[in-house]
Structures are given as C-alpha cells and as structure tokens.
Image (cartoon, rainbow, N blue to C red):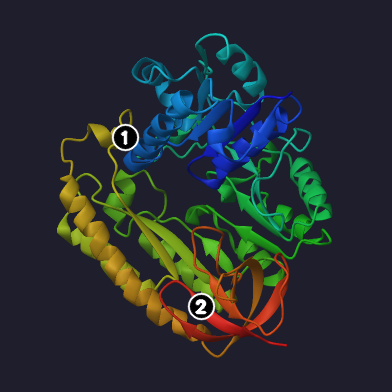
Amino acid sequence: MKKKVAIVTLGCPKNQVDSEIMTGYMLGKYQVVEEPEQADIIIVNTCTFIDSAKAESIDTILEMAQYKEVGPCKTLVATGCLAQRYGDELLKEIPELDGIMGTGNVTEILSTLEEAEKTKVKKVSKEDPAFIYDEAMPRVRLSPKHYAYVKVAEGCDNYCTYCIIPHVRGHFRSRPQESVINEVKAMAKEGVKEILLIAQDTTRYGKDIYGEYRLPALIKEIAKIEGIEWIRLMYCYPDRFSDELINVMKETPKVCRYLDLPLQHAHDKVLAEMNRRGTIKEAEELIAKLREAMPDIRLRTTMITGFPGETEEEFQAVLDFAQKIRFDRLGAFAYSQEESTPAANRPDQIPEEIREKRRDELMRLQHDIAYEVQQRWVGKTLKVLIEEELPDGRWAGRSEGDAPEIDGLVYVHSPKRLEIGNFVMVKITEADSYDLRGEVVL
C-alpha cells in the first residue's frame, strides 16, 4: 500500500508550480492527499519574500509538526525559498523536521523523501539554484482545471536592494519558447481555458537565450492554440514594456485587458535607491500608452512603504501618484528588512509602526479610488469565467480584469444552472471596491 503524502504550498503561484512538479514526481510512488492529518509524509513548500511570509512558513511547519504526535505522519520536510535560505537553522531550531530541500532541487523530491524517512537530510545546492522545469517533467496541476500557471522563466537578475529572491531562486533563465508552447498545447487538450504567464520578471522572457525579448512572439504563438481563451500577463517590469508588446496585447483578443505592473514606489530618488530602473515619468508615459491602446484595461500595481530613508515628502509622492493614476488594483507592503540585502544594512531604517501606518494610509486611499473606478462597469456586460456555486444560489466567477486569488470576483445571479469552468456574459448591476455583482444575459 502506498504511503500518503500531503503538500502544503505557501507564497506565490511560482511556488505553486514547483509543488505541482513535485506532486508529479511523487504520484507513482506515493498517494498524494489534500488533508495533512491523513498523511504519512507532509511537505511544506515555504516562502521567504518578506517577514510575514517567513513567519507564516515557520508557523505552518510547526502546525504540521503536531501531526507527528496525533496523526499517522512520521516524516516532515520543508522545501522552497525559506528552506533554500535557512536550511541549517530550520533543522536546528525545529527538531520535528526530517528534511530540507532547496529551490534548485525540485527533481530530487523522491530521494529527499526516501532519505528523510530514515535520517535527517538536507538537499540545498551550494551553487546558485539552476533548476528550471520543462514540459516533459511530470506535473499535476493543483489549480482548477480551467486555468493554469505557466512559468516562462525562473530566477532574477534585477537585484533590487530590498529583495532576497535572486539569492534563493538564482539567476534569470528562460525556458525555450517551444517548451512553453508544447506545455500550453497539452493544457488546452486537458480543458484549460486561461493561461497565466508568470516569472520573477515576465517581460524579460527570452533575452538570455535568444538575445531579444520574446514575450510578444510567445503571446502570438499561444494565441493560436485552440481552446485557450484568455492569456494573462503577471509580474511585468515597466522598463521593458515595449511598444511592440502593447501592440500585441491590443491586437490579440485572447490577451486579457489586464496587466500586473509592479512599480514599488513613486519617487525617483527612492526608486534609484531600490535599484529599480526607470523613472516615474516613464511609468506614467507607459500607463498612458496602455490606456490609449486599450481604454478598458485593468491595471494592478504594488507599492512598498517605509523603505529606508523614505521621507514624508517621498511617501506623499506615492499617495499623489496613486490619486493621479487611479489604479484598478493596488497592493501595498510595509518594507521588510531582509538580511543579506543592501537595504537591510542601511542605518536609516524607518520604525516598523511608521512603515505600517503609511501602508494603511495608502490602502485606505486606494479603497476609495477602487470603489470609484469600479463604478465604470455598472450597466456594462462582461465575459465571466464561472468558478464556484455559492450556498445562497448565486455563482462566483472572474472577469478578464481579475486574476485568481489576488483580485476580486463577479457574483452572478442566474435563473438556470451554470457550469463551472464555462464563460457566460453578465450584465453588471452593482460594484464595490473589490467585487462586481450582476445577472447572466440569456
């Protein structure tokens, strides 16, 4: 009888893809289950992006460790970014842990589990992580069958002064275009309708292996694949967003009128200190081009508050920018002092309460902006991908302006039963800061 394995995934969709690949490798030897309390082996795929992510990862490991006392679990393994960065410390401080596996060792999951069942094991590459998956690797998607994340590249070479990702994920490396296309074709045959293109820096795709940015060409090829109806772009750096890419988005109906454009700040001095390329003026010009080309585009960004040395004037620039641009979606993080980063060593750290106060102020402003911006959809008819039947008889779905799990939902009234994973047309009758409500157009 096969031993049961449960995998708990934390962090971003890029981590989820790693979990899906590990699941693919395990499937032949183990029975993969959803409930940790039923598992003989538990894997926690961790995140280390900011302090709150590290805390969640450690709390989850400790929570799963309890099943070694009250459940069938005999083996507990931590993988992912926190394991890559703090493997020795985790093994030392959490005695319940039997194994550690880093981000560059994903294909070694079977041998890691086998060794961890016998003795303490640590598998973390001494060199920079170099793993990158391809379409030939086994992968079991953990997302609903109608959408899938496709990681087009791994690692990062941007070295933002606040960010640890290049150290835990390695240098930027793209997948060959043929590999991505083959994977998407296989997904389309399995019923996937929405493809979310992800990487640490999606707009850089192809530069390292082709000598040119290949995201526009990749989009064109994916758009030709029958069955794929939505292509969504995530994690796009503004300084590499070309006119060619804008034109491809505009001219390709399958590309969602949606863009995740993480800017991080709105003052040039702070951006330079963050080692972010480009200026706010250039970002404004890009946004103007995007909105001129696609007036109905939904824009998402993220901002960091309380970066070392940030003055009240510099923070006010963020508020002014948010008020001026009026993003459809804006997320904010209080700066997290990540050891081994240049920003962490600066003497002018902002007190945590001020970082959080500024974050909260920005989010209150964005809440009001989002409410006003959302009203433009009332009275319009949107294409909605149905994802859930609710207990009150309504349905929940997403428009092309909503990425899974991070954006809002469309709540739908329908006189007839709807099929999860299908598209319907919905007339919007009401909007708040995050969600829309409407009725199916029959």
Query: Looking at this view, is 26 or 16 the one in front?
Result: 26
Q: Which residue is drawn at 22% across and 64% down?
A: 316
Picture quarter with the C terminus: bottom right
Question: Which amino acid type corresponds to the residue marked 1 in the rendered image?
Answer: Glu
Q: Which residue is drawn at 42% across and 70% down?
A: 327
Q: Mark 1 points at which residue?
A: 338
Q: Residues within 10 Å of mark 2 (few under 14, many from 20)?
A: many
Q: Residues within 10 Å of mark 1 (few under 14, many from 20)?
A: some
Picture quarter with the N terminus: top right
> Is residue 380 found left or right of 92 in the rendered image?
right
> Is residue 91 found left or right of 199 in the rendered image?
left
Q: Name the residue under label 2.
A: 436
Disc with the residue nearer the chain's start (2 vs 1):
1
Residue 221's image quarter? bottom right
In front: mark 2 or mark 1?
Answer: 2
* Residue 9: % across, % down: 53, 39
Question: Which amino acid type corresponds to the residue marked 2 in the rendered image?
Answer: Leu
